[in-house]
Amino acid sequence: MGGKITEIDTVSLDEANKALVIIDQTKLPGQIQMLSLTKAKEIWDAIYLLQVRGAPAIGVAAAIGMYVLASRYEVDDYDAFYAAFCRDKEYLDSSRPTAVNLSWALKRMEGVVTAHANEDIPAIVDALHQEAMVIRDEDIAVCHKIGEYGMELISPGDGILTHCNAGKLAAVRYGTATAPIYLAEENDYHLHVFCDETRPLLQGARLTAFELQESGVDTTLICDNMSAMVMKNGWVNAVFVGCDRVAANGDTANKIGTSVVAAVAKQYNVPVYICAPTSTIDMATATGDDIVIEERKPEEIAEMWYEKRMAPENVKIFNPAFDVTDHELIAGIVTEYGVARTPYTESLKAIMDNKQKRV
């Protein structure tokens, strides 16, 4: 497929064919390939295999995916419909345990089903369609607001470091951690962005560097173990990263290596900002110690990027997908309702209470 990655929504709905459409991120940057998904196994695989990834994008994909699946149920009564829906919901929810947006979106879709229990099946399916589109549109608006609040934390000419991909490829548009960068670019801030490559899956090298460069942002790719040097050299004024789950105390789970970046930033007095939509804030999780960390296959480290296996056979491999950054290392959590500051137990609660009042 031709065209620029910046001109394509990461997640969308093919209305005519009732299909979830995603950019296959495992093919980037070499090839822009769209996938059209209509079956539960296809959607589960797309999430698990990181064909669609990033907390916001996963949530939107799950919402649209549940509508797509529900529209194909060949049942006439509510109980059978709800049983099929719950089966597929639990199945999709098992694909990625750490990203709270997945379960958040699935629960919202289930809430639509139960709220319309007294209506006929076509009406329920129509309501699911509407909710999926609301979740999609909310993601675009939320990311833009995060960009507005995040831009207030930086100045023209600043150097920014980011880890993994919390860009437009991790959302429908704008991204979370890159939203301030994109809005700053529109306002002629002339930022310089350092992208950590992000081992072992190289989301920074394959995705963030790709989308930022294509958007005209001054971008430099670095290996993960180079972040200390660029900070020590004074080239970085702020770190912006995304997040897959925020605990009530402000601890955050993000792609593996984020906690290392935060610790190094603390050493060199560089503020670390977590860009997190409120859908990622989990007030039921007290601290980062309570977050379930996904562990992935060892082949991603030993074999995935090499013509031949690069590690000794039978060596033990530990491959956690995420780590937890302690709240004490975080200067602020940027949400669509403003920037939360320490003490996070109070500021996050205030933001979530404010959100509840507006609902």
Image (cartoon, grey):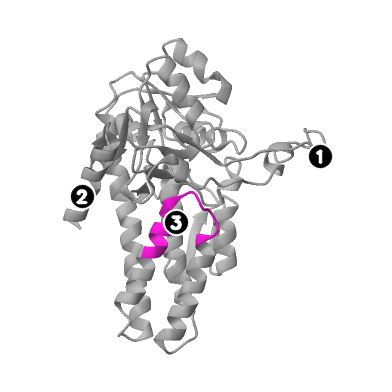
Q: Which residue is at 60% across, 52% downward?
A: 49
Q: Quadrant of the C terminus?
A: bottom left
* Span colored in magenta: 93-107
Classified by dominant secondary structure, the portion drawn in magenta counts as: helix
- The numbered mark, 2 or 3, whose residue comes first in the sequence reads 3
* Residue of label 2: 353
x and y, in percent, of residue 280 in the image: 37, 48
Q: In the displayed structure, does residue 46 sit left or right of residue 305?
A: left
* Residue of label 1: 314
* Residue of label 3: 102
Q: Quadrant of residue 332?
A: top left
Q: Decide: marks 2, 3 in contact (CB < 8 A)?
A: no
Residues packed near mark 3 inside 10 Å, few (<14), some (14 to 19) or many (20 plus)? many
Q: Decide: marks 2, 1 in contact (CB < 8 A)?
A: no
Residues packed near mark 2 inside 10 Å, few (<14), some (14 to 19) or many (20 plus)? few
- For the question of whether residue 224 can be seen, the reply is yes
Q: Which residue is at 64% across, 40% downward?
A: 319
x and y, in percent, of residue 48 in the image: 58, 54
- CA–CA distance in space, label 2 to label 3: 22 Å
Q: Quadrant of residue 198?
A: top right
